Image (cartoon, helix red, strand yellow):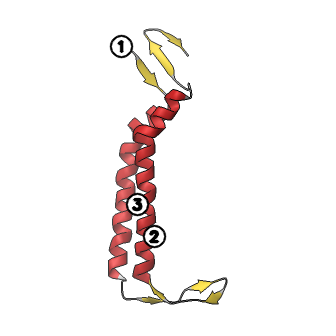
């Protein structure tokens, strides 16, 4: 049997199952804070000067949305795109029995 081992393979198989749940926990907590502080006013600044007011909840919701987008990009890149890119770029070591070939 041939096993293909690349850095992408290791990341996808070992780290991804740990990273995604951790990211999900952070996103859930930030979303909870967004709901909790939905009505808390917040003074915003642009270039050091006061800008249009917002709420802490709205700012936390934007942060949660951005984290979710990053999480989705990590999942897509490591579940298919990343593996395919490593295979196509020739960064593959194939191990068969006791010998190895590039």
Question: Looking at the image, which residue is at 33% across and 81% down?
Answer: 36
As drawn, is 93 to the left or to the right of 37?
A: right
Question: Looking at the image, which residue is at 41% across and 20% down?
Answer: 3
Q: Mark 2 points at which residue?
A: 63
Is 52 in front, or is 14?
A: 52
Q: Above or below — where is 14 with respect to 4?
A: below
Is 76 in front, or is 5?
A: 76
Of pointers 3 and 2, the one earlier in the residue sequence: 2
As drawn, is 49 to the left or to the right of 40?
A: right
* Residue 82 x %, y %: 48, 38
For the residues labelled 3 and 1, the Cα–Cα distance comes to: 38 Å
Q: Name the residue under label 1.
A: 1
Q: Residue 68 carries which label?
A: 3
For the residues labelled 1 and 2, the Cα–Cα distance comes to: 46 Å
Q: Residues within 10 Å of mark 2 (few under 14, many from 20)?
A: some
Dot 2: element: helix
Instruction: Point out the image quarter for the N terminus.
Output: top left
């Amino acid at each position: 049997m041939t096993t293909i081992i690349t850095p992408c393979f290791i990341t996808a198989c070992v780290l991804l199952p740990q990273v995604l749940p951790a990211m999900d926990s952070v996103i859930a907590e930030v979303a909870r804070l967004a709901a909790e502080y939905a009505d808390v006013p917040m003074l915003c600044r642009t270039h050091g000067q006061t800008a249009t007011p917002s709420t802490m909840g709205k700012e936390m919701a934007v942060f949660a949305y951005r984290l979710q987008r990053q999480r989705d990009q990590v999942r897509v890149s490591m579940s298919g795109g990343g593996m395919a890119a490593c295979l196509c770029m020739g960064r593959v070591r194939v191990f068969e029995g006791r010998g190895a070939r590039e």
